Image (spheres, rainbow, N blue to C red):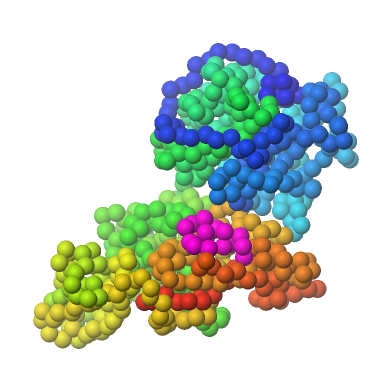
Amino acid sequence: MRIIYAFLFSILTTMLPAQDTSYVCQTVNVITVPLEKLNTKSIEFSPVYYQSGIVYVVARERNSILDPKTGQAYFDLMYADPGPDGLGDKPVFFSPNIRTQYHEGPCTFNRDANEIFFTRSNIAGGKVVNDDKREVQLKIYHAVKGAEDWEQIEELPFCSDNYSVAHPALSADGRYLVFASNMPGGMGGMDLYIVERTLQGWSTPVNLGSSINSKGNEIFPYFHKDGYLFFSSDGRGGKGGLDIFVTAFSSDNTFRGLQRLPEPFNSGRDDLGLIVSDDGTSGYFGSDRKPTKGKDDLYRWNSPVSIFCATIDRPLESRDLLVTNENGDGLETAYVWLITMDKEGPSLYKDHFNTELVPKQDKEGTFFLRWGIQDTLSFETADAITSSTGSAQLKVDNKENYALVVQRSDYLPFIRVMRGEEIPTYVRLYHAPVAPEKCLNTHFTVYNESGTEPLNGANIMLSGPCLKVNLNLYTDPMGNITACLPAGCQIKAEIQKPGYAMHTFTLTPSEENELWKIYLKDATGLTAPTAPITSGTVIVLDNIYYDFNKSEIRKGDADELISLANILKQYPDLTIELTSHTDTRGTAEYNMELSKRRSESSKSYLVSRGIASSRIVTKAAGESEPRNKCVDGVSCTEEEHQYNRRTEVRITNPAQGMEVKYKSN
């Protein structure tokens, strides 16, 4: 690697001890595996996440043209989907527009994957530009995702013909960019710098200082979403040439602490370009550790737990929330939660949430998926409590996904899932129906179908207009549970237990100590449908996003498929048909073929979540069923075209006992 990057820097090594800050400490059971299907006799390094796979750098020979400065092949960007085994297969060139006969190197994407910053040789008019020493420097370029490929390619304003600016790393909020440069005034060969993007443009680059930079080279930075900055350095000692370090971006926009990563991330050779998944349990990096197929190979790593051991003080924005009643009057002592949503749903209090199918207003018999709250959260866990005027202050990360929950005695709870930047300025609560003063002790006993075995831990969910909050109860070892329910009011009871079909009925308590015996059927072999879910019911997955002309699900956009997988696991006899739709750009024949690939992509994702392939049938609709005006010949925005790119789920064999929880939008 040192020879390969001679065109980037000259080697100056000074032995400086790393600080003893620990941000990564869970490495005992970390496993590293080379990506055998992607590694070649050439060079592969600097991976970054993109869509469902990775974009990485490879040295490739084109018409035997070599970099005269290094004698090596020029670099190019490749894309590969690691697949279920995480080892990758069938790499393809990343972009026709980001591919010249010179260097294209390390890159970074924003969270929505519609912006790219990438390293490229300084070229103009298709030819390289030499500096005063007749050398070609590197620059960082920016591009945006267009209908067909990356467009509007422009160099960043702080680049120069006389020094290199390379290896961009974008923060999760898209506000800060860290990069490597040998611009004058640095501390060594290549130093790390940071710039801020504002409405007025980019700020002046700021050197990260001696706590990060050395007299050697600091290169290949990577910004994790939680604020960790990983990079490689050859100027701070260690076992090999380039070692991987980590520091942390704090709320005051400074980097604090420094840690050299332990094995197996660092070895006795060059180690560089480490990336880490959002949950800290997997990722990739480059290394020329032995044995290698070439000079540098790609490696995947996995950990049973997150490798992180410290929490970063992330920059959060203060937001005011006003909670009112139906009349607009401020409500004192309303409890507010802002719960981070991860790919599996709420990060906290999971037992209090469920997945709901909600009827769509624009198409009868069609539903979409959303999260609902099924019982009261403990007030002691609230993130904020409203003041006498009904106001509360929240700390929000604008780019994070949250479930906003507001609860108050005598009022119906509020819940909505949204991005931090969409948190409303006010929430209106509505009074719960007034319950009768008298409640009656009502007993429930749950048995198996034959009545020979009481069922311990059966879940009984009670709801009704006279209940202030829904009740979520569990039976004791004898199958018993008692609740005091309002007299004369209709109560809906839903009883379920893993391995048994859910049973639903209604009751109206009319006397003290009433006893209800419930018998649950074994779920094995049950296929009879139960209303209101019937064969032909459609669930529209509006938030499964595909890029134009692509069949891969965008990275981070599979939330609804995860919810669908959870439903399929809950009802093991449920079978479905997946139909994917394209927009109307391109020929009808091509769009039909693309639609087939997209349906198979959704099916593969569900299978990867543990759903049997035999339960899923795929179909393709192509461009035949647009949902708006965007047909051939009509000019539309990218968002309007996106609205037509969707996947629909049709129920082909409903599950016994499956029932929709109807709620208005």
Q: Residue at x 76, y 40 (%)?
A: 155
- Find residue 407 and report its image quarter: bottom left
The quadrant the N terminus occupies is top right
Above/below status of 526 relative to 296: below
- Residue 160 visible, this angle: no
Q: What stretch is highlighted in magenta?
A: 599-613
The residue lying toward the viewer, choosing from 523 and 224, is: 523
Relative to 270, is 309 on the left or the right? left
Tally the marks. 0
Residue drawn at 19 percent across, 69 percent down: 453
Residue 301, percent from left and from top: 52, 37
Q: In this view, does 563 lie above or below 634?
A: above
The quadrant holding residue 125 is top right
Q: Classify residue 159 as left or right of residue 463.
A: right
The answer to whether 601 is drawn above or below residue 56 in the figure is below
Q: Does 600 lie within the magenta span?
A: yes
In the image: residue 7, left or right of residue 426: right
Q: Does the magenta stretch include residue 436?
A: no
**Camera-nearest residue between 225 and 477:** 477
What residue is shown at x 31% (from left), y 55% (from top)? 382
Q: Main secondary structure of the magenta part?
A: helix
Q: Is residue 423 above or below residue 75?
A: below
* Quadrant of the rendered image containing residue 638: bottom right
Q: Position of residue 50 (x, y in %)?
A: 63, 48
What residue sits 64% from the left and 56% below the top?
552
Coordinates of residue 96 in the picture (x, y in percent)? 79, 48
Instruction: Determine if residue 557 is in view.
Output: yes
Percent of width and height locating residue 207: 61, 27
